[in-house]
Image (tube, rainbow, N blue to C red):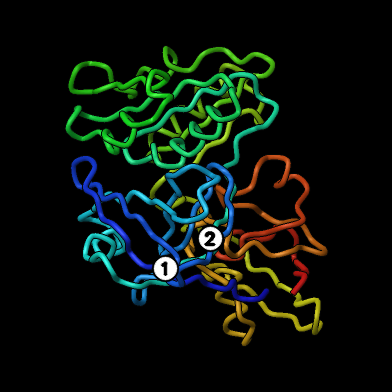
Amino acid sequence: MTAPRTLDVVVHALTPDGEGVLLVDLRPADAGTVLPPFDAGAHIDLHLGGLIRQYSLVGAADERDRYLVAVLRDPDGRGGSAAVHRLAVGDRLAISPPRNAFRPDPDADHSILIAGGIGVTPLVSMAETLHRRGDSFELHVYTRTPQSLPLQRHLDSRPWRDRVMLHFSAHGDGFRGRAQTVIPRPRPGRALYLCGPLGMIASATGCASALEWPRDSVRAEQFGRVRSVEAPGEAFTVVVASTGRELPVAPDETIAEALRRGGVETTLACEQGICGACLTPVLAGVPDHRDEVQSAAQREAGSLITVCCSRSLTPTLTLGI
Ligand code: FES
């Protein structure tokens, strides 16, 4: 694995847009250069001092002169959102090129986008793309109150504003306990995209599964630590294919930690199985996938593993590094 290159950007504008939400407009540090293209649902890493944090791109996928991210200040967070809220216009920072594990299905004829709170961010760029393609979609946003709705002004400015349905739990229209009334039955060509907190995603995916939605028609991105990341497992051995070196992975350590202990550099960002930065080729063995990045088909193929959190179902796992 090689470390991804970073891009230098400047904070061009900071716009509050919702309770505790800051819309950050990042432009290339070198005037005249353009930013790499991205697909709807993509995210970037922001390098914030010693922290690296992932944020979904909010803007239109064909914008090459700026990236927009929206960051909710989380007083109980790990410091990333507080660092973003301390940024000032003119600050320079490094970002990663966009990565994407949450793309819209190009073959869907109707997409249902359901967001909880700040989970609206990747779905905004998805809605933008679906609108530009002329595809049918609806975007449902669940928050506690109208005041806690993130990106109200941004949403109001979009030409697809009439596809947005707002739901406020304080007005008796929350998601909790009502997943069955919100998620329709599956049908060919219908796709479901979910982004929100862990509890909401668990309830929505449980409901979709009970309604027999095909697994590949449901894509979900969640906040918060992935439970399985913290669950220890059996010890196993990873083999570094380029050198033949064998490294034991203890029950309570990750593959990335074992590799680092053996002097093998890995690329890490979220360390929670949600960003895809550490995806590594698997040449032999069967991964025990514990990430939220890969689709069901990708997991089944077993050709990539997130070394920050996933483990092995076989005593040995050979990595293509
Ligand atoms: S570092 Fe983000 S998925 Fe592994």
Q: Residues within 10 Å of mark 2 (few under 14, many from 20)?
A: some
Disc 1/disc 2 C-alpha distance (Å) = 9 Å
> Tag 1, which secondary structure?
strand
Give the quadrant of residue 249.
Answer: bottom right
Label tally:
2
Number of residues whose C-alpha sits closer than 10 Å to that of mark 1, classed few (under 14), some (14–19) or many (20 or more): many
Q: Residue at x 58, y 24 (%)?
A: 209
Position of 76 relative to 320 (above/below): above
At 42% from the left edge and 44% from the top edge, which residue is drawn? Answer: 58
Residue 62 occupies which quadrant of the picture? top right
Residue that appears at 32% across and 61% down: 12
Front position in the image: 311 or 47: 47
Using residue 116 as the reference point, say whether residue 89 is left or right of it: left
The residue pinned by badge 2 equals 35
| Position in image of residue 43 (x %, y %) | 49, 53
List x then y, in percent, for residue 187: 65, 13
**Disc 2 residue type?**
Leu
Secondary element under disc 2, as helix, strand or loop, is: loop
Above or below: residue 62 compared with residue 248? above
In the foreground, 23 or 112? 23
In the rendered image, residue 236, in percent from the top left (x then y), is placed at 68, 69
* Residue 256 sits above or below residue 279 on the image: below
Q: Amino acid at mark 1?
A: Val
| First of labels 1, 2 by sequence position | 1
On the image, the x and y values in percent for residue 113 come to 48, 27
**The C terminus lies in which quarter of the figure?**
bottom right
Q: Which residue in the protein does label 1 denote?
A: 9
The one of 122 and 222 positioned closer to us in this rendering = 122
Residue at 63% across, 47% down? 294
Give me the disc on residue 218. none
145 with respect to 320 (left or right): left
Disc 1 to disc 2: CB gap under 8 Å: yes
